Amino acid sequence: MTVRHGDVTSKWIASGSARLSQVFRGSADWLADPIGAIPPRPCPHRAANVEAAGTGLNEPVCYREIGPRTVIAMDRVSSWRLKIERAKEHCAALDAEVVAWVATKPITMTKEKDPDGRRHALVAEIVTPPLLDRWALMSGDCVHNLRSALDSLLYGIAIHETGLNPPKDEARLQFPITSSPEEFEVQKKRRLCSLSAAVQSEIEKAQPYKNPHQEFPPVLELLGSLNNFDKHRTLHVVAAVPHAASISDIVSTGDATITVSVYRTIITGRTEILSFTIEPPNPDLAYKYEAQITICIAHSPGPSKSPFSQLAAVLASLIEDVERIVSILEGVVGQMQNPVNVNLSQASHFRIDKAGVTVIKALPQTSEAGHT
């Protein structure tokens, strides 16, 4: 007997996800002490009226002067880390809902055949509809938090490298996501001009054109495209067949030739996910099958040529990549929350790196009623 598998036929699809919780163990630990567990971030500015407000600069709170005799406390937790944790929360909530849906055994599989037994097919049907619109919104919230975490990180780095809050180029600061070295150079001049060469270099190393993925598009590219898509539309989340179904343990009398066609496709109503022909025909053919139907998300095709992937795998990769980039950049700028060897009443511009803090430019003391 000869079994010949034809090319996989890909129909345009969206995507979905299965279990997520295993990936994000301990993602909510920070909630136990969201403020006290993280040391305060000293401010590089001297607020002229701090004493008038009854608070000294040595207290564990950052202050910024915004007007005569007006001082506000700055946030004491790295906002980019909070955004990443929030993304994990969305994933955990999504996981719980998908698992509950799967527990209802929402999909049936049926073997079908032509009367003469020449063509056989495997048909899937959803009997319990998934909450695709809701899961698309939850996925979009996760993606947005991850994308904005990168922008928030650059904003924090700019404050610490320039000593200005807000930075002079705050309206242009953005973590660039580019597809070529030439495009990165353009974006670097526009988006990263206030950041040090060391930080710019690490940002370029994280770019999609330097980090291909084996299955889907480069992870950072995927993050950018999904975030942009979600700004104007809802992410396309569906129940689909992300990987080819297969048949095995075929029982047939005599010699036979079987040609198999499998389909990566969205499951809507009754959907054929695999078919095969057998010569000579055999209406009594017995066989086993294996098929995976899961929640997927649509994206531009990557190396696998599939226009969708498991939502769980995509979100896990996005979180892992953003955390990796954040950790690298935090390492480059050193202990961002605790600058040392800097006179906070004098510092205007300073750089923080692995070697410590270097004052680049200092301004003279301001008068008590003046502005820093």
Image: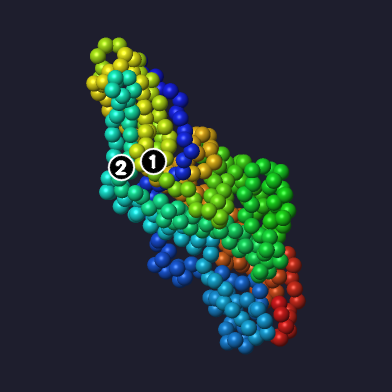
Residue at the (66%, 74%) spot, across then down: 45
**Element class at badge 2:** strand
Q: Position of residue 28 (x, y in %)?
A: 40, 61
**Few, some or many residues within 10 Å of mark 1 (<14, 14–19, 20+):** many
Q: Looking at the image, do the residues carrying marks 2 and 1 touch, with CB atoms under 8 Å apart?
A: yes
Q: Amino acid at mark 2?
A: Ile
Looking at the image, how many numbered discs can be counted on the residues?
2
Q: Position of residue 134 (x, y in %)?
A: 41, 56
Q: Is residue 276 visible?
A: yes
Q: Is residue 358 visible?
A: no
Q: Is residue 85 above or below residue 269?
A: below
Q: Earlier in the sequence, mark 2 or mark 1?
A: 2
**How far apart, in angstroms, are the residues tagged by discs 2 and 1?**
10 Å
Residue at the (48%, 38%) spot, across then down: 12
Read off the residue under disc 1: 267
Residue occupying the far top of the picture: 255
- Nearest the camera: 156 or 358? 156
Read off the residue under disc 2: 107
- Nearest the camera: 359 or 176? 176
Residue at the (71%, 66%) spot, across then down: 168
Residue occupying the far front of the picture: 115
Q: Quadrant of the N terminus?
A: top left
Q: Position of residue 73 (x, y in %)?
A: 57, 77
Q: Amino acid at mark 1?
A: Ile
Q: Dividing the picture into quarters, in which one does residue 117 lie?
A: top left
Q: Please say which color scheme the image uses.
A: rainbow
- Nearest the camera: 29 or 240? 240
Q: Position of residue 319 (x, y in %)?
A: 48, 51
Residue at the (31%, 24%) spot, across then down: 114
